[in-house]
Image: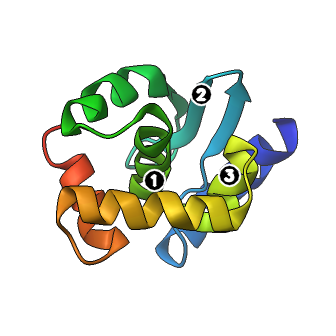
């Protein structure tokens, strides 16, 4: 965290943020994730941390209203977060081909043609 904080404070000091946005630090603890961002006042004299805790279980409960099975709901959650099949497989401890099959079922059940549209369905009013 110290390395990240030094890098971000340096970026604010050199106005590197005109070239790249601030880079958040994400800390995972079990199911919860803590997103930490550094922000600065307009004159750059004061830096402060913006903290956001995310609990995927509340999102999964909302997604369950779509009528998917529990595993498909988890896969849709990660699709909405922009993860690839391979990444979802690593997260859920499944083979990418298994995730691919879940994605096919999700697309059919939601009546959409691609994962981008499925992500939109998942995020509209639910995430």
Instruction: Tell which circle, 3 or 2, labels the residue nearer the N-terminal end.
Output: 3
Residue 35: give x, y in percent of width and height.
56, 35
| The C terminus: image quadrant | top left
Q: Which residue is mark 3?
A: 8
Residue 96: give x, y in percent of width and height.
69, 65
Q: Which residue is mark 2?
A: 34
Asked if 13 appears above or below 48 in the picture, the reply is: below
Q: Secondary structure at mark 1?
A: loop
Residue 66: give x, y in percent of width and height.
21, 39
Residue positioned 39% across, 36% down in the render? 69
Nearer the observer: mark 3 or 1; the answer is 1
Q: Which residue is mark 1?
A: 81
Viewer-closest of 109 and 92? 109
Instruction: Answer with the quarter of the image where residue 31 lies.
Output: top right
| The N terminus: image quadrant | top right
111 left or right of 68 in image: left
Instruction: Answer with the quarter of the image where residue 103 lies.
Output: bottom left
| Furthest-left residue in this view | 125
Asked if 108 appears above or below 9 in the picture, the reply is: below
Measured in 3D between alpha carbons, the distance from the residue under mark 3 to the one under mark 1, in whole angstroms, is 24 Å
Measured in 3D between alpha carbons, the distance from the residue under mark 2 to the one under mark 1, in whole angstroms, is 15 Å
Q: Secondary structure at mark 2?
A: strand
């Amino acid at each position: 965290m110290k390395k990240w904080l030094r890098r971000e404070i340096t970026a604010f000091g050199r106005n590197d943020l005109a070239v790249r946005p601030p880079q958040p630090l994400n800390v995972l603890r079990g199911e919860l994730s803590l997103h930490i961002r550094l922000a600065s006042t307009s004159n750059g004299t004061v830096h402060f941390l913006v903290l956001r805790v995310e609990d995927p279980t509340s999102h999964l409960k909302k997604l369950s209203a779509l009528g998917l099975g529990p595993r498909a709901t988890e896969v849709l959650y990660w699709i909405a977060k922009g993860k690839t099949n391979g990444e979802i497989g690593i997260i859920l401890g499944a083979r990418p081909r298994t995730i691919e099959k879940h994605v096919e079922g999700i697309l059919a059940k939601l009546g959409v043609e691609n994962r981008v549209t499925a992500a939109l369905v998942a995020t509209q009013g639910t995430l």
